[in-house]
Image (tube, rainbow, N blue to C red):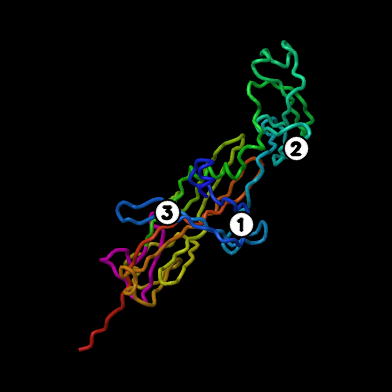
Amino acid sequence: MRGLLTRVSVVLILFVGLSTLGHESAYADTECQVTDPLTGQCTVWVEVPADPGSPGEPGVDGPQDTGSGAACYWDGTSQGITKPPPGPVPCSSPAGYWSNSYRCYISPVEPQPPAGDPSWQGHEPADGAVYNCYQPQTGLLITIWSQDTPPNSGTGPTPREVAQIAIEQMRLSAISIGIAPEPGPDSIGLVGMPVWMWAKDPNAHTIGPLSESASAGGITVTATAKVLQITWDMGDGTEVVCDTAGSPYKPSYGRKDSPDCGHTYTRSSAREVDDAYTVTATSSWVITWSGAGQTGTIRLDGLNNSAQVRIGEAQVLVN
């Protein structure tokens, strides 16, 4: 993950080497990215592969990651051309290399036209060069002058990499944990009593949906992110998977179970570190992107936050 972070200078570049997720093990980077200065709670960003389904179908953990997309694409809509529709094209052909910016295959004119030729567009030969620009979608072949060599889109970013830049702009983060009983030494729950879990003060950055666009290498991609589910590790060997942000607890609810995200402890936390269970909430995001005549899905599993809760046993006094 860090190699790709360095390459594109964004925080949210994910799934290096996992353009198609399978059953391989993934390694988690457990360095704290964010520490709450008041509580000392650590937000950790890790990478975990989803359990895939069939191609194009969701797995048990939701939609699977769908790869990187093609860096070279045709889009004639700005020219009023709708057929063929936008989509990937080969990055090279006998006519040259593909340029997304010019929407054609580029090759230098050989030999270069003499000085004063109209193809120089009033420039001198020392100012740049004249290139062939062939558009097979329309059969159009023209010459263009360019001071710099037209960019080769085959060496540029893929739509997925541009989508990842958009994701970085979203500044997605782990949820703030809401739980009853409340964390802290002055609050204690009881064995057999319902525990409620929820995303405290949820917003677009912690739950979604949130959309951003980014451009690079002649590609513009729009990405939309939303949380698919939150997995709660309750610290007692139990995991609770919640498909919603959960419902905040109110004292008026008494001993009712949470309607959508709850747990019941069967033993006290007296033998745990700090006499408390460490509860970790891990958000699983699904990001869909579209651009360059293509669409795809990125899975982000591993934004998490932790809190400690104390669970005791009710004592019955007999005189």
Specify the amino acid type for callout 2.
Lys
In depth, the one of 186 and 271 nearer the eye is: 271
Task: Check residue 188 for magenta coloring.
Answer: yes
The local secondary structure at tag 3 comes to loop
Q: Residues within 10 Å of mark 2 (few under 14, many from 20)?
A: few
Q: How crowded is mark 3: few (under 14 residues within 10 Å), some or many (20 or more)?
A: few
User: Toward which corner of the image does residue 245 lie, by quadrant?
Assistant: bottom left
Which dot marks residue 31?
3
Residue marked by disc 2: 83
The local secondary structure at tag 2 comes to loop
Residue marked by disc 1: 21
Specify the amino acid type for callout 3.
Glu
Going 74% across and 25% down the picture, which residue do you hit? 132
The local secondary structure at tag 1 comes to loop
Specify the amino acid type for callout 1.
Leu
Alpha carbon separation for disc pair 2 and 3? 49 Å
